Amino acid sequence: MVGAANESRSILRYNLDKEGGWVPFDSTDDPERPGVFIELIPLLMEYAEIDAVEYNLPTKRGVVALFKGNLDFDFVNPQWVSEEEAKDFVFSIAILPVTENFIALAENQHMAQDTQQIYGKLVGTVAGYYYYDDDLFKRADFRSESEVMLGLAHKRFDVAIMEQTAARYWSKIHQVPIALGAVHTQGDIVLRLRAEKKFLLPRINHAIEMLHQQNTINEILEHYVGTVQGN
């Protein structure tokens, strides 16, 4: 079981940010939909025959702990990771697809369509997140996607960067009409594992394959996407 280590099985440590992290992936305030990763991790680790120990750290502290080796894995799009940061990790096969967009208020949708017009300006971002092109714009860092959405609503900046599902979720929660603009990154979420634990990667990949074959991952994701579409 996740959080209850068995001495006969390998143990991996991970973080779930319950203070407004990457919702609806990390966690939510909805007991019927606690978070995509919260539902996925126990299934994934059980198939891989690995025990996972959960920590609850804010996003930035969780990232620091991972890079220091105090945590063992997280979930990420490899395109969000710099070459320097990637050298200490191995990556699983694809778990689920993600698209990250520039977003704007619906009334200002034209502002998020052309990256050349965005570059050089202030852009809403999440502290601790890697953005491959952040040398081309000015970051307005907030603790979470929720706070970025509120910053957009209060016109602290005209454009933000956010993953589509998270953007739709927080648009609905905060009642902020938005428009999705140009694609920033597109790819897959994978499990990022500390390199010293790479011997466990074949078991993790096999578990992911099993969950795909059973359509379990799609069913979990649809449970959340169906509640946040419509913006």
Image (cartoon, rainbow, N blue to C red):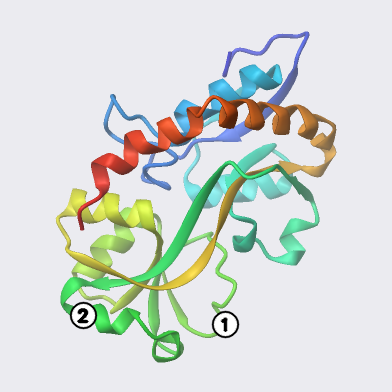
Q: Mark 2: few, some, or many residues within 10 Å (few <14, many ≥20)?
A: some
Q: Report helix, strand or loop for mark 1.
A: loop
Residue 226, image quadrant: top left
Q: Which residue is rendered at x = 51% and y = 50% of the image?
A: 97
Q: Report helix, strand or loop for mark 2.
A: helix
The numbered disc on residue 25 is none
- Could you give the CA–CA distance between mark 2 and mark 1, rounded to whole angstroms? 24 Å
Q: Position of residue 201 (x, y in %)?
A: 77, 34
Q: Which residue is rendered at x = 58% and y = 41% of the image?
A: 95
Q: Which residue is rendered at x = 42% and y = 31% of the image?
A: 220
Kind of residue sitting beneath label 1? Asp
Q: Which of marks 1 and 2 precedes in the sequence? A: 2
Tag nearer the camera, 2 or 1: 2
**Which residue is labeled 1 in the image?**
135
Residue 185 seen from this side: yes
44 or 15, which lies in front? 44
Residue 142, image quadrant: bottom left
> With respect to residue 151, does 55 lie above or below?
above
Q: Position of residue 210 (x, y in %)?
A: 63, 25
**Which residue is labeled 2 in the image?**
108
6 or 141, which lies in front? 6
Residue 45, image quadrant: top right
Q: Is residue 124 left or right of residue 13?
A: left
> With respect to residue 154, does 91 lie above or below?
above
Kind of residue sitting beneath label 2? Asn
> With respect to residue 190, does 215 lie above or below?
above
